[in-house]
Image (cartoon, rainbow, N blue to C red):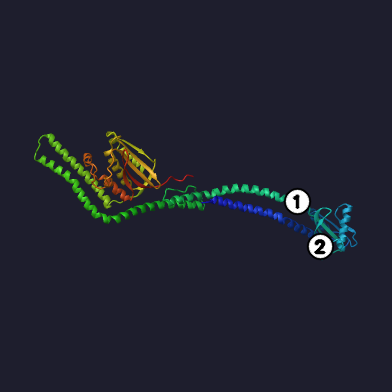
Amino acid sequence: MKISMRKQLALIFTGLMAAVLLTCMLANLFLQEDFYYIRKTEALEEAYEILNAGIDETGQVADDKMTAFNSLRLSNNIIFVITNRIFEKVMWTEMNASDLRIFVGRLNGYILGIDIDQKASLLEQTDSYVIRKKYDNAMGTDYLEMWGTLDAGFYFMMRIAMAGIRDSVGITNEFIQYVCIIGILVSTVIILWVTGRVTKPIHELTELSKRMADLDFNVRYTSGGKNEIGQLGEHFNQMSEKLEQAYSQLMTANNELQRDIEKKTKIDEMRREFLSNVSHELKTPIALVQGYAEGLKECINDDPESRDFYCDVIMDEAGKMNQLVKKLLTLNQLEEGNEQVEMERFDIVPLIRNKIQSVSILAQQKEVRILYSGEDTLPVWGDEFKVEEVLTNYLSNAMNHVEGECRIEVRTARMENRARISVFNTGKPIPEEDVPQIWDKFYKVDKARTREYGGSGIGLSIVRAIMESFHQKYGVKNCDDGVEFWFELECGNVPELKN
C-alpha cells in the first residue's frame, strides 16, 4: 500500500478546498472589476429612470422620486448636473464653482458633439443617453459617465468615480491569500483527524482479513460502531467463528480422507507384520511362563523361596505380556484407522508441564533432572490425547536411556506456522545404522538393556503411527552429549490485534 486511504482522503479534501479558495481568488482578481462596472452601470440606469419619471417641465422633481434618487446617489457616490436647453443649471450636486463650470461645460460639449474623448470606452448607448468608461487625466482615475436628454426636455450628466476598485481588488486578494493559507492548514488538521476516525476501523478490518487469510480465526473486530463499518465488523466476527468451525471440520475430514486412501494398501501388510512380530515377542515370555509353571507342578524345588521365585517370574512375564498386548492393541487401532483423529486447537505448553510433573517422582528416584525451555504459550492443531501419548513415549524412552549428567530437557520452538516439540536426554548416541529402524515395531537397538527395563519396542512405533495420522513430521538426531527426539504440529494462531 503506497498511500493509505487516510492520506488519500486528506489530500483529496485539502486539494478540493485549495482549489475552491484559489478559484475565489482568481475570480476576485479577474472578474470583480467587470462585475463592479456592471453594478455601477445598473445604478446609473436606475438613477436615470427615477429622474426621468419624476421631473416635470418646470424642473421640479416629485418628493418620493427625489428621496429615492438621493438615496441611490449617496450609496453610489453619484455626482450630477441637470440643465435646460440653453445649458442653465436646474439641479446639481454640491461642488465648488470651478468644478461645476467644468462639469457643465463638459455636458455642453457632449451634447454638441465637440468634446468626445475617443479613448473612452462605450458601455451602452440608447436614444436618450450614453454610458461610457472614461479616464480623467486631471484626476488620474477612471469614471463612469452617463449623459443625455430627459423626456421633460432637460440635459443631464452623472458620474461615478472608480478610483478605489483596483486597490480594493488587491487588498481583497491579499486577504484571501492569508485566508487560504490558514484555511488549508486548519482544514488539513481537521481532515486528518476526521479521516483517522473513519479509516481506523477500515484499517482494523484490513488487518483482520489479512490474518484470517493466514488461517488465524481467533481475531475479533473490537472498534464497534452502529454504522455500516460497525455492521461489517460484526459480520467479520461471525464469519471468523464459522470459518474456525469449518476449518476444524475440514482438517478432521482431510485427515480421514488421507487415512482412507492409505488404509486399503496397508491393511494386509500390517496384519502379516503384526502376527509375525507378536509371535516373536510372545514366544520367549510364554516359554518362560510354561517352563516355570511346569517346574511348580512337578515340584522341582519344594522350598518356599524357590516357589516364590517361580511365581514372581510367572507374574513378571505375564505382566510384560499384558503391557505388550495393550500397546499392540493401541498401535493396531492407530494403524488400522479405527480411531478417528479429532483435530482441535489447544495450548501444548500446559500439557508438557503436566507430563513433566507426572514423572517427577520417578525422576527423583533415578536422580534425573527434567527441565523445560521454550514458549510460554504455544497453540497447536492436533488430537490432544494422542499428542499426550507421543510425549509420554518420548519421556519414557528418555528416562530409560538417560546417562551421564542425567538431564532431560523438553523444548518448544515456533517456526513460522509450525511448532517443534523435542525431548532431549544426555547419554549414548544411537548408532547411525539403527536410526532409520527405531520407528519399526519391535525393533530394539540394545536388546539386553531393553529387556532389562521391560521395553517392548512398541513405543516409538506408536509415535510414528500417531504422527502419520496427523500427517506431520517427526524424527530423532544425535547430539554431542545425548539424543533428541522431536515432532512438529501446525500452529493454532498468532497473538491478537491490539487497539
The secondary element bearing badge 2 is classed as strand
Nearest the viewer among 473 and 339 is 473
Tell me the CA gap for discs 2 and 1.
27 Å
The residue that label 1 is drawn on is 167
Q: In the image, 41: left or right of 455?
A: right
Write down the quadrant of residue 308 in the picture: top left
Residue drawn 87% across the image and 53% down it = 99
Q: In the image, 441: left or right of 252?
A: left
The residue that label 2 is drawn on is 130
Categorize mark 1 by other alpha carbons within 10 Å: few (<14), some (14-19), many (20+): few
Type of the residue with mark 2: Val
Q: In the image, 386: left or right of 306?
A: right
Point out residue 372 in the picture as x, y percentages from the top left corner: 35, 38
On the question of residue 56 being in view, the answer is: no
**What number is the disc on residue 467?**
none
User: Looking at the image, do the residues carrying marks 2 and 1 touch, with CB atoms under 8 Å apart?
Assistant: no
Nearest the viewer among 382 and 47 is 382
Point out residue 218 in the picture as x, y percentages from the top left corner: 42, 48
